[in-house]
Amino acid sequence: LKVMSELTASIRELPVLPDDSALLLGQYLSALGILSPEEEEDLHVRMMRGAVERGHRSIVFKPHPTAPARYSRALETEAARLGVELTVIDLPVLAEVLFERSRPGLVVGCFSTALFTASAFYGLPVARIGTGPLLDRLTPYQNSNRVPVVLADGLIPDLEGGKGEKTLPANTLDGLLDALSYTMQPQIHPPLRGAAERYLSKHLAPRTKRYFRRKRLTALGLPGGLPERLAFMPRNSTARRVVRRARALRKAVQR
Protein backbone atom coordinates (compact mmCIF):
# COMPACT_ATOMS: atom_id res chain seq x y z
CA LEU A 1 0.00 0.00 0.00
CA LYS A 2 2.89 2.34 0.72
CA VAL A 3 4.38 1.71 -2.72
CA MET A 4 1.00 2.16 -4.41
CA SER A 5 0.46 5.40 -2.52
CA GLU A 6 3.77 6.75 -3.83
CA LEU A 7 2.81 5.74 -7.36
CA THR A 8 -0.59 7.39 -7.04
CA ALA A 9 0.97 10.62 -5.80
CA SER A 10 3.16 10.79 -8.91
CA ILE A 11 0.18 10.79 -11.30
CA ARG A 12 -1.11 14.33 -11.83
CA GLU A 13 -3.41 14.09 -14.83
CA LEU A 14 -5.92 11.59 -13.41
CA PRO A 15 -9.42 13.10 -13.61
CA VAL A 16 -11.58 13.51 -10.53
CA LEU A 17 -14.09 10.67 -10.50
CA PRO A 18 -17.65 10.83 -9.18
CA ASP A 19 -18.25 9.81 -5.58
CA ASP A 20 -19.64 6.30 -4.93
CA SER A 21 -19.19 5.34 -8.57
CA ALA A 22 -19.06 1.76 -9.83
CA LEU A 23 -15.71 0.93 -11.41
CA LEU A 24 -15.83 -1.60 -14.26
CA LEU A 25 -12.58 -3.41 -15.06
CA GLY A 26 -11.94 -4.51 -18.64
CA GLN A 27 -9.49 -7.35 -19.33
CA TYR A 28 -9.59 -7.72 -23.16
CA LEU A 29 -10.45 -11.42 -22.95
CA SER A 30 -11.09 -11.64 -26.69
CA ALA A 31 -7.38 -11.09 -27.28
CA LEU A 32 -6.77 -14.29 -25.32
CA GLY A 33 -9.27 -16.17 -27.46
CA ILE A 34 -11.55 -16.79 -24.47
CA LEU A 35 -14.44 -14.61 -25.65
CA SER A 36 -15.39 -13.14 -29.00
CA PRO A 37 -15.25 -9.34 -29.28
CA GLU A 38 -19.05 -9.25 -29.33
CA GLU A 39 -19.28 -11.40 -26.21
CA GLU A 40 -16.81 -9.19 -24.39
CA GLU A 41 -18.77 -6.09 -25.33
CA ASP A 42 -21.89 -7.75 -23.95
CA LEU A 43 -20.02 -8.63 -20.76
CA HIS A 44 -19.16 -4.96 -20.21
CA VAL A 45 -22.77 -3.96 -20.81
CA ARG A 46 -23.91 -6.55 -18.27
CA MET A 47 -21.42 -5.09 -15.79
CA MET A 48 -23.02 -1.69 -16.23
CA ARG A 49 -26.56 -3.01 -15.94
CA GLY A 50 -25.69 -4.94 -12.79
CA ALA A 51 -24.08 -1.88 -11.19
CA VAL A 52 -27.09 0.28 -12.05
CA GLU A 53 -29.43 -2.33 -10.57
CA ARG A 54 -27.44 -1.97 -7.35
CA GLY A 55 -28.19 1.73 -7.29
CA HIS A 56 -25.09 3.27 -8.87
CA ARG A 57 -25.78 6.20 -11.18
CA SER A 58 -22.13 7.01 -11.96
CA ILE A 59 -20.15 4.41 -13.87
CA VAL A 60 -16.39 4.45 -14.49
CA PHE A 61 -14.95 2.10 -17.10
CA LYS A 62 -11.27 1.23 -17.08
CA PRO A 63 -10.59 -0.64 -20.33
CA HIS A 64 -7.55 -2.77 -20.90
CA PRO A 65 -4.85 -0.51 -22.42
CA THR A 66 -4.86 -2.51 -25.67
CA ALA A 67 -8.63 -2.95 -25.98
CA PRO A 68 -10.37 -1.42 -29.01
CA ALA A 69 -12.18 1.89 -28.63
CA ARG A 70 -15.50 0.34 -29.70
CA TYR A 71 -15.80 -1.28 -26.26
CA SER A 72 -16.18 2.19 -24.78
CA ARG A 73 -18.70 3.18 -27.45
CA ALA A 74 -20.94 0.21 -26.61
CA LEU A 75 -21.00 1.34 -22.99
CA GLU A 76 -21.71 4.94 -24.00
CA THR A 77 -24.79 3.76 -25.89
CA GLU A 78 -25.99 1.72 -22.92
CA ALA A 79 -25.30 4.55 -20.46
CA ALA A 80 -27.44 6.89 -22.56
CA ARG A 81 -30.23 4.32 -22.59
CA LEU A 82 -30.06 3.86 -18.81
CA GLY A 83 -29.67 7.55 -18.09
CA VAL A 84 -26.45 7.20 -16.08
CA GLU A 85 -23.16 9.10 -16.10
CA LEU A 86 -20.23 7.28 -17.73
CA THR A 87 -16.55 8.14 -17.38
CA VAL A 88 -13.97 6.24 -19.43
CA ILE A 89 -10.41 6.17 -18.10
CA ASP A 90 -8.16 6.22 -21.16
CA LEU A 91 -4.91 6.64 -19.20
CA PRO A 92 -2.60 3.63 -18.75
CA VAL A 93 -2.81 3.51 -14.95
CA LEU A 94 -3.18 0.61 -12.56
CA ALA A 95 -6.62 -0.05 -11.12
CA GLU A 96 -5.13 0.31 -7.64
CA VAL A 97 -4.39 3.95 -8.40
CA LEU A 98 -8.10 4.50 -8.93
CA PHE A 99 -8.92 2.62 -5.72
CA GLU A 100 -6.79 4.99 -3.68
CA ARG A 101 -7.60 8.20 -5.53
CA SER A 102 -11.37 7.85 -5.94
CA ARG A 103 -12.59 5.13 -3.51
CA PRO A 104 -15.30 3.65 -5.79
CA GLY A 105 -18.46 2.32 -4.19
CA LEU A 106 -18.22 -0.95 -6.15
CA VAL A 107 -15.56 -2.66 -8.26
CA VAL A 108 -16.80 -5.05 -10.94
CA GLY A 109 -14.77 -7.40 -13.11
CA CYS A 110 -14.51 -10.93 -14.43
CA PHE A 111 -11.42 -12.50 -12.85
CA SER A 112 -9.03 -9.57 -12.66
CA THR A 113 -6.53 -9.73 -9.81
CA ALA A 114 -7.55 -6.14 -9.08
CA LEU A 115 -10.80 -7.51 -7.63
CA PHE A 116 -8.79 -9.17 -4.88
CA THR A 117 -6.58 -6.18 -4.15
CA ALA A 118 -9.67 -3.95 -4.04
CA SER A 119 -11.27 -6.16 -1.41
CA ALA A 120 -8.24 -7.25 0.63
CA PHE A 121 -6.11 -4.09 0.64
CA TYR A 122 -8.57 -1.24 0.08
CA GLY A 123 -11.69 -2.62 1.74
CA LEU A 124 -13.88 -1.95 -1.30
CA PRO A 125 -17.03 -3.90 -2.24
CA VAL A 126 -16.42 -6.16 -5.24
CA ALA A 127 -18.48 -8.31 -7.59
CA ARG A 128 -17.61 -10.67 -10.42
CA ILE A 129 -19.46 -11.58 -13.59
CA GLY A 130 -19.08 -14.09 -16.41
CA THR A 131 -16.79 -16.59 -14.67
CA GLY A 132 -19.08 -19.60 -15.18
CA PRO A 133 -18.85 -19.83 -18.98
CA LEU A 134 -15.10 -19.22 -18.88
CA LEU A 135 -14.55 -22.39 -16.87
CA ASP A 136 -15.90 -24.40 -19.80
CA ARG A 137 -14.09 -22.41 -22.47
CA LEU A 138 -10.57 -22.35 -21.08
CA THR A 139 -8.44 -24.72 -23.11
CA PRO A 140 -6.45 -26.75 -22.54
CA TYR A 141 -7.75 -27.75 -19.11
CA GLN A 142 -4.37 -26.83 -17.60
CA ASN A 143 -4.64 -23.24 -18.89
CA SER A 144 -3.10 -21.12 -16.12
CA ASN A 145 -6.04 -18.70 -16.21
CA ARG A 146 -8.17 -21.46 -14.67
CA VAL A 147 -6.77 -20.74 -11.20
CA PRO A 148 -7.75 -17.04 -10.98
CA VAL A 149 -11.11 -17.79 -12.64
CA VAL A 150 -11.87 -20.44 -10.03
CA LEU A 151 -10.78 -18.16 -7.19
CA ALA A 152 -12.87 -15.28 -8.48
CA ASP A 153 -15.89 -17.54 -8.95
CA GLY A 154 -15.49 -19.07 -5.50
CA LEU A 155 -14.58 -16.04 -3.39
CA ILE A 156 -16.22 -13.00 -4.98
CA PRO A 157 -20.00 -12.41 -4.96
CA ASP A 158 -21.82 -12.70 -8.27
CA LEU A 159 -22.96 -9.33 -9.62
CA GLU A 160 -26.09 -10.87 -11.13
CA GLY A 161 -27.20 -12.69 -8.01
CA GLY A 162 -25.90 -16.18 -8.69
CA LYS A 163 -29.20 -17.76 -7.67
CA GLY A 164 -28.39 -17.30 -4.01
CA GLU A 165 -24.94 -18.86 -4.23
CA LYS A 166 -22.63 -18.27 -1.31
CA THR A 167 -18.90 -17.78 -1.49
CA LEU A 168 -16.76 -20.77 -0.57
CA PRO A 169 -15.61 -21.25 3.05
CA ALA A 170 -12.06 -20.01 3.54
CA ASN A 171 -11.03 -23.24 5.27
CA THR A 172 -11.64 -25.23 2.06
CA LEU A 173 -9.43 -23.15 -0.23
CA ASP A 174 -6.18 -25.03 0.39
CA GLY A 175 -7.91 -28.29 -0.51
CA LEU A 176 -9.51 -26.73 -3.58
CA LEU A 177 -6.17 -25.45 -4.88
CA ASP A 178 -4.48 -28.78 -4.20
CA ALA A 179 -7.20 -30.63 -6.11
CA LEU A 180 -7.12 -28.11 -8.94
CA SER A 181 -3.33 -28.25 -9.16
CA TYR A 182 -3.33 -32.04 -9.31
CA THR A 183 -6.06 -32.30 -11.94
CA MET A 184 -4.37 -29.64 -14.08
CA GLN A 185 -0.82 -31.04 -13.82
CA PRO A 186 -0.82 -34.58 -12.35
CA GLN A 187 2.61 -35.33 -13.84
CA ILE A 188 4.15 -32.34 -12.05
CA HIS A 189 2.24 -32.70 -8.75
CA PRO A 190 1.86 -36.45 -8.04
CA PRO A 191 2.18 -35.94 -4.25
CA LEU A 192 -1.08 -33.94 -4.33
CA ARG A 193 -3.19 -36.93 -5.37
CA GLY A 194 -4.16 -37.78 -1.80
CA ALA A 195 -5.19 -34.20 -1.08
CA ALA A 196 -7.20 -34.11 -4.30
CA GLU A 197 -9.02 -37.32 -3.38
CA ARG A 198 -9.87 -36.00 0.08
CA TYR A 199 -11.17 -32.68 -1.24
CA LEU A 200 -13.24 -34.21 -4.01
CA SER A 201 -14.70 -36.87 -1.71
CA LYS A 202 -15.83 -34.28 0.81
CA HIS A 203 -16.49 -31.05 -1.09
CA LEU A 204 -17.52 -31.97 -4.64
CA ALA A 205 -21.03 -30.51 -4.75
CA PRO A 206 -23.19 -28.48 -7.15
CA ARG A 207 -21.28 -25.34 -6.10
CA THR A 208 -17.84 -26.78 -6.89
CA LYS A 209 -18.46 -29.32 -9.68
CA ARG A 210 -17.97 -26.68 -12.37
CA TYR A 211 -14.33 -26.32 -11.35
CA PHE A 212 -13.49 -29.86 -12.46
CA ARG A 213 -14.29 -31.56 -15.76
CA ARG A 214 -15.88 -34.95 -15.24
CA LYS A 215 -13.89 -36.40 -18.10
CA ARG A 216 -10.70 -35.27 -16.40
CA LEU A 217 -11.71 -36.81 -13.08
CA THR A 218 -12.58 -40.07 -14.83
CA ALA A 219 -9.25 -40.25 -16.64
CA LEU A 220 -7.40 -39.69 -13.35
CA GLY A 221 -9.56 -42.13 -11.39
CA LEU A 222 -10.70 -39.45 -8.95
CA PRO A 223 -13.99 -39.05 -7.05
CA GLY A 224 -16.60 -37.44 -9.26
CA GLY A 225 -15.53 -39.23 -12.43
CA LEU A 226 -17.78 -41.50 -14.50
CA PRO A 227 -18.68 -44.24 -14.45
CA GLU A 228 -18.59 -44.24 -10.66
CA ARG A 229 -18.29 -48.03 -10.47
CA LEU A 230 -15.05 -47.80 -12.43
CA ALA A 231 -13.65 -44.78 -10.60
CA PHE A 232 -11.05 -46.95 -8.88
CA MET A 233 -9.68 -48.35 -12.14
CA PRO A 234 -8.05 -45.58 -14.18
CA ARG A 235 -4.92 -45.40 -12.02
CA ASN A 236 -2.98 -47.09 -14.80
CA SER A 237 -2.79 -46.55 -18.55
CA THR A 238 -4.35 -49.90 -19.44
CA ALA A 239 -7.46 -49.26 -17.37
CA ARG A 240 -7.81 -45.79 -18.83
CA ARG A 241 -7.67 -47.19 -22.38
CA VAL A 242 -10.41 -49.69 -21.53
CA VAL A 243 -12.64 -46.92 -20.18
CA ARG A 244 -12.03 -44.75 -23.25
CA ARG A 245 -12.85 -47.62 -25.62
CA ALA A 246 -16.04 -48.41 -23.73
CA ARG A 247 -17.19 -44.80 -23.92
CA ALA A 248 -16.34 -44.58 -27.63
CA LEU A 249 -18.32 -47.76 -28.32
CA ARG A 250 -21.30 -46.40 -26.41
CA LYS A 251 -21.25 -43.18 -28.44
CA ALA A 252 -21.03 -45.16 -31.71
CA VAL A 253 -24.06 -47.25 -30.76
CA GLN A 254 -26.02 -44.10 -29.85
CA ARG A 255 -25.39 -42.67 -33.32
Image (cartoon, rainbow, N blue to C red):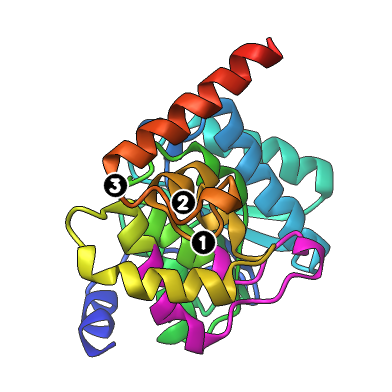
Q: Are marks 1 and 2 in contact (CB under 8 Å)?
A: yes
3 or 1: tag closer to the N-terminus = 1
Task: Name the residue that disc number 1 marks.
Answer: 223
Q: Quarter of the image holding residue 44?
A: top right
Task: Name the residue that disc number 3 marks.
Answer: 236
Residue at x-position 38% and y-position 60%: 147
Marks 2 and 3 sit apart, C-alpha to C-alpha, by 14 Å
Q: Quarter of the image holding residue 80?
A: top right
Q: Are marks 2 and 3 in contact (CB under 8 Å)?
A: no
Task: Name the residue that disc number 2 marks.
Answer: 217
Residue at x-position 51% and y-position 86%: 170
Marks 3 and 1 sit apart, C-alpha to C-alpha, by 16 Å
The amino acid beneath tag 1 is Pro
The amino acid beneath tag 2 is Leu
The amino acid beneath tag 3 is Asn
1 or 2: tag closer to the N-terminus = 2
Is 31 displayed left or right of 136 in the figure? Answer: left
Start-end of magenta stretch: 153-179
Packing grade of label 1 (10 A; few <14, some 14-19, many >=20) is many
Q: Answer yes or no: is residue 111 visible.
A: yes
